[in-house]
Image: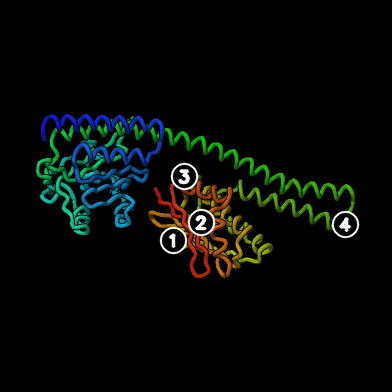
């Protein structure tokens, strides 16, 4: 490549960099920003492809964006589903740093790692890379792995480029010293932008949480007013007018007191045992389903851990509220005659599964809930935003299945 061509490519790269970060100020989309950073890194280095991993709160590296121009593969390709769902652990079970993987080594050392030939290297474990190559009939040779560091000097992501190309004959070569310095500079600027974006997203989330907390308080006040208030008002009027017998009046007062106890149990009583609290929610709804829907609620715990294990208050409260929202939706809309609830606690994951069955028209109910109102929005918000989990809906053999998956930190 001539000096003029090199100068033109370098100028174009600077313009691309300016364009990306200028557009960031207008469109604060983290997915788009990270994708553009990787595209730019591939473009200015002439690499065949690359990956960006994000550091998770589970102390792992998660595949976020993958591009390989030669293979024609990108992150959304179905062939990469297994690869992109894999996480690289940064620490072992004793809490010691794991550095046998080149990406985890770059994370812990906070330094760039250049591997000229992955197949000739004995410094790192490239078994996963070799398995990928075998599957796709590809050869990953030269690797450039660079940590992306945020404002607090902690690694927030890893940028990895694969197979630098010689501009003369397009053969795979090691990354040159100049290219390495350019990528390190790009990573430094990217770290500031990604970190700033995360700060903005966290602030937005806190504001959203505050608004939702206020909405939750307002809902509780409505529950108190509509439930206990109406019962007590009616009892008071009946007592004053003597319209009912003493025994009938006592029944109305007892009903109001029972409702008060139920609301107090729902929102005040707390135990850090997830198994106990989910069981409590089911018990609170059993009579309602039996009397109003002629529907049977069944609950079973299926897990590796004992019932005495304690969890954080946030996790327990949010899962309780999620189950309440699901059961309230079922109470209003579901035609099911039996609802099975299963809680599964594993070493690395918590699953909450609700199965509605024995109904011919259950499939008509499915789209109504998935595109539902405030209750459905609250469920997704708690699962995905507050707990970092996933929620899925399925319909099989006249059974509607709602599955919640939460990874344990």
Nearer-the-camera pick, 229 or 381:
381
Question: Between tags 3 and 4, which lies in front?
Answer: 3
Mark number, residue 275: 2
Q: Are marks 1 and 3 in contact (CB under 8 Å)?
A: no
Q: Are marks 1 and 2 in contact (CB under 8 Å)?
A: yes
Task: Tell me the distance, in whole angstroms, between the alpha carbons under discs 2 and 3.
Answer: 22 Å
The first of marks 1 and 3 along the sequence is: 1
Nearer-the-camera pick, 60 or 199:
199
Crowding near the residue tagged with mark 4, few <14, some 14–19, many ≥20 C-alpha atoms within 10 Å = few
Image location (x, y in percent) of residue 154: 31, 34
The first of marks 1 and 2 along the sequence is: 2
Image location (x, y in percent) of residue 357: 55, 67
Question: Between tags 1 and 3, which lies in front?
Answer: 3
Task: Tell me the distance, in whole angstroms, between the alpha carbons under discs 1 and 3.
Answer: 25 Å
Q: Name the residue tied to disc 1.
A: 303
Q: Is residue 60 visible?
A: no
């Amino acid at each position: 490549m001539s000096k003029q061509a090199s100068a033109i490519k370098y100028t174009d790269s600077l313009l691309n960099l300016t364009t990306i970060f200028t557009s960031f100020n207008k469109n604060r989309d983290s997915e788009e920003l990270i994708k553009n950073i990787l595209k730019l890194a591939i473009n200015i280095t002439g690499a065949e492809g690359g990956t960006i991993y994000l550091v998770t709160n589970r102390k792992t590296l998660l595949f976020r964006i993958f591009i390989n121009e030669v293979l024609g593969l990108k992150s959304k390709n179905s062939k990469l589903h297994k690869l992109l769902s894999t996480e690289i652990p940064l620490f072992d079970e004793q809490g010691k740093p794991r550095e046998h993987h080149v990406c985890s080594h770059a994370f812990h050392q906070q330094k760039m790692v250049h591997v000229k030939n992955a197949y000739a290297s004995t410094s790192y474990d490239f078994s996963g890379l070799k398995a990928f190559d075998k599957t796709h009939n590809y050869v990953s040779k030269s690797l450039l792995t660079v940590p992306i560091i945020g404002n607090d000097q902690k690694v927030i992501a890893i940028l990895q480029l694969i197979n630098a190309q010689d501009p003369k004959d397009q053969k795979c070569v090691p990354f040159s010293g100049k290219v390495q310095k350019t990528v390190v500079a790009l990573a430094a600027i990217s770290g500031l932008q990604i970190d700033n974006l995360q700060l903005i997203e966290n602030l937005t989330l806190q504001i959203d949480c505050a608004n939702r907390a206020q909405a939750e308080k307002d809902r509780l006040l409505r529950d108190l007013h509509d439930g206990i208030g109406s019962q007590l008002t009616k009892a008071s009027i009946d007592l004053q007018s003597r319209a009912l017998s003493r025994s009938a009046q006592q029944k109305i007062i007892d009903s109001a007191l029972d409702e008060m106890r139920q609301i107090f149990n729902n929102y005040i009583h707390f135990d850090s045992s997830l198994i106990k609290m989910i069981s409590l929610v089911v018990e609170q709804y059993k009579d309602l389903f039996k009397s109003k829907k002629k529907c049977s609620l069944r609950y079973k715990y299926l897990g590796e851990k004992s019932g005495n294990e304690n969890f954080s208050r946030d996790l327990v409260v949010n899962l309780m509220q999620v189950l309440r929202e699901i059961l309230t939706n079922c109470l209003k809309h579901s035609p099911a005659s039996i609802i099975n609830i299963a809680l599964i606690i594993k070493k690395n994951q918590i699953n909450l599964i609700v199965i509605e069955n024995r109904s011919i028209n259950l499939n008509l109910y499915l789209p109504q809930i998935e595109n539902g109102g405030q209750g459905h929005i609250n469920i997704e918000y708690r699962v995905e935003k507050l707990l970092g989990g996933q929620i899925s809906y399925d319909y099989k053999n006249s059974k509607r299945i709602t599955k919640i998956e939460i990874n344990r930190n």
